[in-house]
Image (spheres, rainbow, N blue to C red):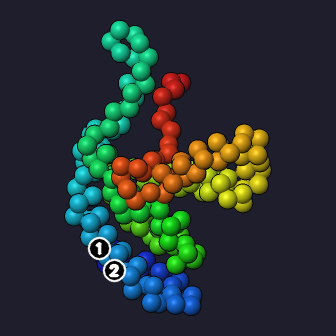
Amino acid sequence: FYQKDDVLPQALRRLFAEKKEGLSLWIFVETDLKKFGGRCSNVLHPMMAPMERQKPWVEEYTAYGRRINKLHTCPQWKFMKKESAVQGLVSIGYTERQKYGGLARIWQFAKLHLFSPNSGLYGCPLAMTDGAAKLLEGIVTGTEKEAHDKVIVRSGTSSHALCMDAYQRLISRDPEIFWTSGQWMTERG
């Protein structure tokens, strides 16, 4: 998908060229995007049909009427979670900032641009994961002053440790550690 796009590679190259050392970083990023674009075409895209047939659903009650709220997902949905972690679809924007600066977010969004239309809507929980990671980053670093004061200053250091643990899980590349953030619409109208 990446190599067949007439605009994306040129636009990204131009953005990277504007930064000092951007073109040397671009070589690595473009290689990653080409490889991931091929993976989206050959591995992820074929998974969409089963994901459409077996959409995630919430089992609210057991046969005996006990509330359980159990989430059921197909194997392809679980694969997308692992793929998201390994590919760094959330983490790149955070863990690569020291090396790439603001270009890390551009790289992250380029990968999400390739992933989302081939993921059976898995891009939605990743967007919520990125938002939760951004908020928690601000809380643990103190850059989100109001949220930091409400969560950390008022609640104490144990809250800081919990926020830091959650943040690290949201930006992890390890599928066994990686968390996603999302909501499941279970209400009825």
In the foreground, 65 or 120: 65
Judge from the rendering whether residue 88 lies leftward or rightward of residue 50; answer left or right. right
Counting from the top left corner in percent of width and height, residue 92 is at: 47, 67
Considering the numbered disc 2 on the image, is that residue within a helix, a strand or a loop? helix
Q: Is residue 6 visible?
A: no
Which residue, given by chain and number where applicable, does mark 1 sit on?
Answer: 35
Q: Residue at x 46, y 47 (%)?
A: 180
Q: Is residue 47 above or below residue 11?
A: above
Which numbered disc covers residue 75?
none
Tell me which residue sits at (44%, 84%) in the image.
26
Give, as a three-letter code, the residue at label 2.
Thr
**Cβ atoms at labels 1 and 2 below 8 Å apart:** yes
Three-letter code, disc 1? Lys
Question: In terms of image quadrants, where is residue 118?
Answer: bottom left
Q: Nearer the viewer, residue 164 or 40?
A: 164
Q: Residue at x 37, y 56 (%)?
A: 174
One can see residue 92 in this view: yes
The answer to which of 140 and 79 lies nearer the viewer is 140
Up-down: is 136 above or below 22?
above
Q: Residues within 10 Å of mark 1 (few under 14, many from 20)?
A: few
Question: Measured from the top left, where is residue 104 in percent x and y?
Answer: 51, 73
Q: Is residue 31 left or right of residue 162?
A: left
Q: Residue at x 27, y 47 (%)?
A: 76
- What residue is disc 2 on? 31
Residue 94 to residue 7: above or below: above
Quarter of the picture containing the N terminus is bottom left
Residue 168: x %, y % from top left: 51, 54
Q: Quadrant of residue 113?
A: bottom left
Q: Residues within 10 Å of mark 2 (few under 14, many from 20)?
A: few
